[in-house]
Image (cartoon, grey):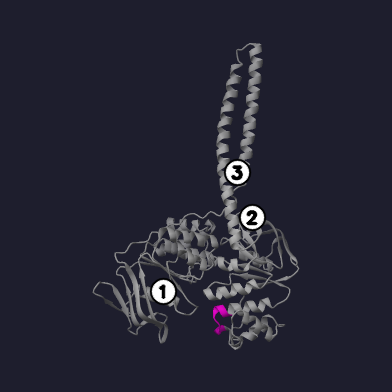
Amino acid sequence: MSVITVNDLTFAYEGSYDNVFEHVSFRLDTDWRLGLIGRNGRGKTTLLRLLMGQYEYSGSIVSPVGFDYFPFAVENTEQETWEVAAGINPELELWQLQKEIGRLGVKEETLYRPFKTLSQGEQTKVLLAVLFLRENAFLLIDEPTNHLDREARKVLGAYLRTKKGFMLVSHDRQLLDTCVDHVLSFNREVIEVSQGNFTSWNENRERRERYETAENERLKKDIRRLEAAARQAHAWADRTEAQKIGSGYADRAYLGEQSRRMQSRRKNLEKRQQAAIEEKSSLLRNVETAETLKLYPLRHHKEVLAAWNEVTLGYGNISVCQGFSLTVRQGERIALQGKNGCGKSTVLKALLAAAGTRPEEQKEERGQDGDRKAEQNGKAQSGTVLVKSGQLRLASGLKISYVSQDTSGLRGSLNDYIEACQADRTLFLALLRKLDFPRVQFEKRMEDYSEGQKKKVLIARSLCEPSHLYIWDEPLNYVDVFSRMQIEELILSCRPTLLFVEHDQAFTDRIATRVVQL
């Protein structure tokens, strides 16, 4: 049992006027399974980089062990996976790694494949196994679950639960509940350390916020009452003082005493008022404001918006998702689930391609009811989803809003992006602010945003688009827990028709009306 001590830490990025951390102090145990929680942009990844010694700072960080950061770039992905592992940890024995990856559900034969041929989930598991086999290191794990399917997340959580000595940055509530025993929370004003998992921490946070909100209301009433009493005492004192003029000696002495008492009472009331104001100012400093988001879904005149009938999808000569059938009815919120690579995103892209059909890409026919039908014609361009057999049918005039899992296209200024989207600028920026997007970010180039901030830009765009059907492909990757809960409340309140892929179990459990397994 050893202690990592952070004392009086202050840090700001070069050229920035605002400190990311200012006189921050806390202590961590090297045996803890620590969850790091906070809004996007609060400095979670920055803290990890400071612990790794990547930036200069004032204050001190004292640790009896070294730090390892995950994820990190593998320089030569052409090497066999075992060679990559040995390069990271030269003291590693093959049998140790074989045993360790087995606990993560990775087959031994994976070690003899080129690293680049592994799925993202397999790469994540192998690299974590390698790092946990190193001695005298406190592991800093930065959002390992992005793009991992649900089953892989469960395996990862169960594995981490058997370990100790790590700091995990994750927005997946179920994962945090599974494997952490302490929480380091980046609040609005302070950083706090508490014992427990995400659920216990969140319950304590909500309990504290309810108490502080009630105290705040009580103090506001007290301040209003004291203000009224002070004004009345001030008026009485002034009237009594004025009555002294023209009075006899005895009357003046009596009135002077009355005036003194009134002035004293007024000062006491003002002191009590100031004390109440100071007490009130110490409340609600760390309350995470989650303003209500708005969405304006359109109502279509048809009940069925989209239908796949025994569809086989593919890219060129490659077939994906054979014999797929699904009907999307108005008002449904359907979650597509399945392992990575089973075709979830392909299903979504096929619908988008059919909705934006071009004659050279897909044959378009009209049914008797006026709906569109996309069928095989063998002319899909490279990368375009092709309906190889079966039928995909969309309601006519269907308006779709799409959130992609890929944020790499976000470049340039935010204002130019909003203009290109033909979105209402005021509404767009207001939505970002409600998602705790700092105003200072509005002036920066989007390629400099964090991944969580980029995702919020895509979500804000979708919320600005009145549509019959919302298609979201892993919208919550990198998005903080509080924003996830805001989006959940939005969906439950506005009830849009939604077809989505999302590996956050808590989110899906709460908002999906139907789950479809691929």
| Distance (Cα) linking label 3 and label 1 | 50 Å
Q: Nearer the viewer, residue 296 or 211?
A: 211
Q: Residues within 10 Å of mark 3 (few under 14, many from 20)?
A: many
For label 2, the residue is 190
Q: Residue 348: which numbered mark, if any?
A: 1
Which three-letter amino acid code belongs to the residue tagged 2?
Val
As drawn, 56 above or below 365: above
Residue 482 picture location, percent across and down: 53, 60
Residue 170 picture location, percent across and down: 58, 67
As drawn, 424 above or below 112: above
For label 3, the residue is 280
| Distance (Cα) linking label 2 and label 3 | 17 Å
From this viewpoint, which residue is outermost toward the left? Answer: 368
Asked whether disc 3 touches disc 1, contact meaning CB atoms under 8 Å apart, the reply is no
Which three-letter amino acid code belongs to the residue tagged 1?
Leu
Q: Which residue: 38% across, 76% down? A: 350
**Of the residues under marks 2 and 1, which one precedes in the sequence?**
2
Locate the N terminus and report the quarter of the image it occupies. Answer: bottom right
Instruction: Locate residue 172 relative to residue 134 in the image: left or right.
Output: left
Q: Which residues are magenta?
A: 116-122
